[in-house]
Image (cartoon, helix red, strand yellow):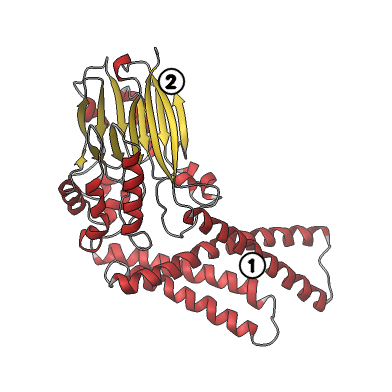
Amino acid sequence: MTFSKILIPFTVMLTLTFLLHRYIWLRMVRDVAWTGPWGKVFTIAIFTLAALVPLVFLTMRTAPRSFAVPLSWVVYTWMGFLFYLFVFSVLSDMGKGASHIVGIIPQDPERRRFVARGIAMFIGTAAGAVGLTGMYNVARGFTVKRIRVPIAKLPQSASGYSIVQLTDVHVGPTIGRKFVESMVAETNALNPDMIVITGDMVDGSVANLSELVEPLRDLKAKDGVFFVTGNHEYYSGADEWIAHIRTLGIRVLRNERVDVRGAFDLVGVDDASARNMLPDHGMDIEGAVEGRDVSKALVLLAHQPKAFSHALKAGVDLQLSGHVHGGQMIPFNWLAHIDQPFIADLHRVENTWIYVSAGTGYWGPPMRVGTQAEITWIELISSSV
């Protein structure tokens, strides 16, 4: 990656980080005019945390994990609380704007300061409560979510075929080997016919994370374990990760088709963003299904739900995706619709199903608000049964 490609996004991140922290400082500190030393304490805390944000992005892929992990926990947790401080601050500003319009803002400076402090305390309490709830949801770990998908082309002899889907684990700054070991044990306990990993397993290089993902070698399924790339593999060195994942006994599908017991075809494709990352990569559903027996059922592994438009044209019966994390933290579940057609759960359009997992891990802040991490147990049912 060229220096300019690193410098531009880093500069944008620095600018947004400063503006966001300054906005929170204005609303939570300056406008409130805290008495005693509290104003200075809050100011130092806010801008110290602001300085740590670019530091963690500079060091998380190069510094020893003994340094990077504690720093990442502090920064990513703060980013989660900061986000909700921003959300509630914006809502309070909208409320103040409406109050100005109807003329109910107090004119006395003391009363206005009292109201400002009350609003700041409410914002801090609300953001704290939501953030702590999100952290509790992450601490609960993943749940096993079971779904049944009727497929007309599936022969009755294969009805009840089980697939366990793992996705968006994001092993890296705050997710380590113990999480992977727990996930592997839970997955193997389900005794599936097949295990599929639909991308974004890692956030970091093979050199830094290979030891953490080593437990993936222990995944067991009757018909094997299959993997497709997500966008974060491309941020982390896709070719290196593809080669390493293959050494763990996992088959990486790159626009490839596999016959499964003569009952259905399994197709796995590169991530939708791959073509922009590496010249010899790119999603090619049409090429992967070319020449297949169209009377057989077809299951597609594609990291991003946006591949669904291609899946419809290709006659896919079921697409399995992740990427969106179910939104992970409200209101991202609403905003994600701007880029993706589906956010979570099972949907059907015409004769094609799509299941979008909410993800097995999390990305960024160790919080889930309005969502729960999952291991998905998918049972394929012949619709004639």
Frontmost residue, 131 versus 187: 187
Q: Residue furthest top?
A: 384
Residue 280 appears at what percent x and percent y?
A: 17, 44
Q: Earlier in the sequence, mark 1 or mark 2?
A: 1
Locate residue 120 relative to residue 105 in the image: left or right. Answer: left
Disc number for residue 96: none
SS under mark 1: helix
Residue 64 appears at what percent x and percent y?
A: 27, 72
Q: Is residue 117 above or below residue 318?
A: below
Q: Nearer the viewer, mark 1 or mark 2?
A: 1
Q: Label 2 belongs to which residue?
A: 350
SS under mark 2: loop
Locate residue 245 relative to residue 362 in the image: left or right. Answer: left
Task: Please tell me in which quadrant of the rendered image residue 124 appears.
Answer: bottom right
Frontmost residue, 93 versus 74: 74
Locate residue 111 relative to residue 206 in the image: left or right. Answer: right
Frontmost residue, 238 versus 217: 217
Within-10-Å neighbours for mark 1: few <14, some 14–19, many 20+: some
The CA distance from mark 1 to mark 2 is: 47 Å
Q: Residue at x 72, y 67 (%)?
A: 119
Residue 203 appears at what percent x and percent y?
A: 31, 57
**The C terminus, quarter of image:** top left
Q: Is residue 151 above or below residue 288?
A: above
Looking at the rendered structure, the kind of residue marked 2 is Glu
Q: Residue at x 51, y 59 (%)?
A: 135
Q: Label 1 belongs to which residue?
A: 124
Looking at the rendered structure, the kind of residue marked 1 is Gly
